[in-house]
Image (tube, helix red, strand yellow):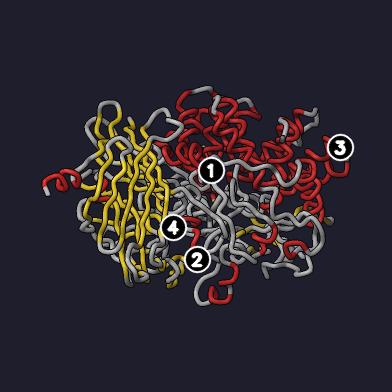
Amino acid sequence: MEEKSVMRTVRIPLTWMRNTVCELEPARMLWYSTGRPWKLEEQEWKVLSWDGISETMVMISGQIRAELRVVKPEEVPEGYGCLRLRVRFENMGKEPLACFAGGISLPVRGKPKQKVTIPHMIYNDNPSADPERVVPHIGDEPGKGLIVEEHRLPIPAVNVEWRKKTGYPFLTLLSLPRVETGEDEDYWSLGALREEDGVRITAASGVLMFNGMKDVFYGGRCTPLSYMKGYRTLASGESLKKTFYIAWGVGKKEGRGYRNLTDLGYRVLKPRLEPFHSCEEMIEYKRRVLDSRYVENEKYAGYLTFGSANSFGNISGRPEYFLYGWTGQAIKLAWCDCMLGLEAEEKFRLKRGMQVTDFFPRNGESGTIPGLMRGYYMIDTGEFRGAWNDKAAPLSSRIQGESIADCLEVMLLLRAHGIDIPAKWEDTVRRACAFLMKEEGRTDKGLYPLAWTLDGKPESHEINAGGMPCVLALAAAAEYFREEAYLACACMQYERYAVCHMDTFEIPFAHATMDARCEDKEAGLYFFVTAAKLYELTGRECFREWGKLAADWILTFVYHWNTGFRPGTPCAEKGFRSTGWPGVSVQNHHLDVFFPTYELYRFGKLTGDERLTQMARVISGAMTQGIATQEGEWGYTIIGEQGEQYYQTNYFQVRYPAILKYLEHYRGGMQVWNPSWITAQVMSSALKFRYWESFA
């Protein structure tokens, strides 16, 4: 009896740099439940054996025999500790066990200033999310929490960081996926539960919890639905097995614990993907879409955001418009046309790209405040405005910043090829940058607001990352005009944003995806791109570090593994692979192509970070999928079209009750929603790789 008591209290200290981060108690880590709803309760395990050499514990509770083995990984990482865990539950009884759930849990209690990161789902519990919208949260009440499907997580892991006198320890649990058929039974689940004085990292054999509600999942935009597929039936003698990795360490600064997710995920999951199409093929496919969107007459020239060339017509149902920035990226498309024209000496393309660029600086200013730009041009009424459906809409800082930065990229390209830049372009860009340099257009924290009123005042003063493209525009202006004032302002503004978001990550990057008021990839994306640009221009170490912080943050949205898809779905039939695809936000759980692949590659080269360059290659390869290579493929008439949304998890981008019509799209469907930014992102990246680097 005494020997068994000793075995039950076996502890494995997780130490790093002479600091004990926490202790594992093998006899208290495993849990199981029978019946609905599932319960996570500490089991009364009878320890049958503990092998200190192989570090394997065998236990029994009721008719469940459990085995937990702790081994060192084959590759020992630098910078943190790591162990591999192998877990096995076996039904030793004569009768089957219905409604079985089991797993592993790691309590993180009594540790102050905790920050939880669950890739794509939870960033310090999403403090910037609109409280009126239903999005994932762990919550503050004991018993609440979030446990989601493995395939919902780009890196199937949970990281918790906390404060200690010696630094900021962190603990990560990573679940190693094992996809065999693509059916629901292939996938486990992972998340965190709130407890009285902390959280409990929890892995389960498939059962779920959404915002404290058991057997509930996030099935559509802001839409929780019932889910009963997570329970297992264990026949007599049948077993469940799973492999996990535990990592731990101590950081020097607050809020950096999430970076362990991307490094551990890269090492363990080993993301690799060969392109489905060559760079040349991708450019040719996207050229066809570009041509199908171009329109001009004596009044205007531009690319339709949606267009009606496909058999289904204008999928948006909206009046036709040009959109500069956000989901339109009209000037980025013009850059693509200019680049094609310069490379192939197709003078009509160069002329066309310059006409499109010219239309914006000549007509896009608000008319109320010099340099304040409007982002939508309505074809039917011939007017610029701040939103397609509202003449009086505030003017987006993101659209202002993206459009001016893109204009400057066109100007830099043309100047590099000896082409004179129209004075009107330079004048408009200077006025736009002058507006951005005025304090009265900023919030009380010195940031750019999400939007300006038509008289140039901040619409609100909330902390947000939506205006970071304005800093990028100033940096690009410094590069083009070679004027120190622009660069100094860009550096000052970036530092202000860093204080609000990156000093502690209490407020993670949020509010750049304009239809999702929450933590999102696109917010972190512009923190990365702008830091990378400022590092190139200044060589300052702070921008190198901020660029790496932001790169790791946005990489938590990128799938480091192939989820597989439900058999019979389009993605399964086409051999689509999720590896390398980015997700979107804590609200929108689908895949899309919005990612700075070339910029990540270039930054990785500049900083000597092979992981970043390799991930850029993987992401670039991923985006060669989902292309209509012939009429009718993926539902498109125009060859080269590509969907905005591919569904790797139990999600479809509509709300309740409309979601009930689209459940068959879960885990393998897609939408033919096709705004022009898809072409702009993929084509510009491919052209940059072809022009400046080898794509292979």
* Residue that label 3 marks: 344
* Residue that label 2 marks: 221
How far, Cα to Cα, is label 1 from label 4? 30 Å
The amino acid on which the numbered mark 4 sits, given as a three-letter code, is: Trp
Which numbered disc, 4 or 3, marks the residue closer to the eye? 4
Q: Is residue 597 in sight in this rendering? A: yes
The number of discs equals 4
The amino acid on which the numbered mark 3 sits, given as a three-letter code, is: Ala
How far, Cα to Cα, is label 4 from label 2? 23 Å
Tell me which label, 4 or 2, sits earlier in the chain.
Answer: 4
How far, Cα to Cα, is label 4 from label 3? 51 Å
Q: Position of residue 695 (x, y in %)?
A: 72, 35
* Residue that label 1 marks: 525
Q: Position of residue 669 (x, y in %)?
A: 62, 64
Q: Secondary structure at mark 1?
A: helix
The amino acid on which the numbered mark 1 sits, given as a three-letter code, is: Leu
How far, Cα to Cα, is label 1 from label 3? 31 Å
Which numbered disc, 4 or 2, marks the residue closer to the eye? 4
Q: Quadrant of the C terminus?
A: top right
Q: Secondary structure at mark 2?
A: loop
* Residue that label 4 marks: 188
How far, Cα to Cα, is label 2 from label 3? 44 Å
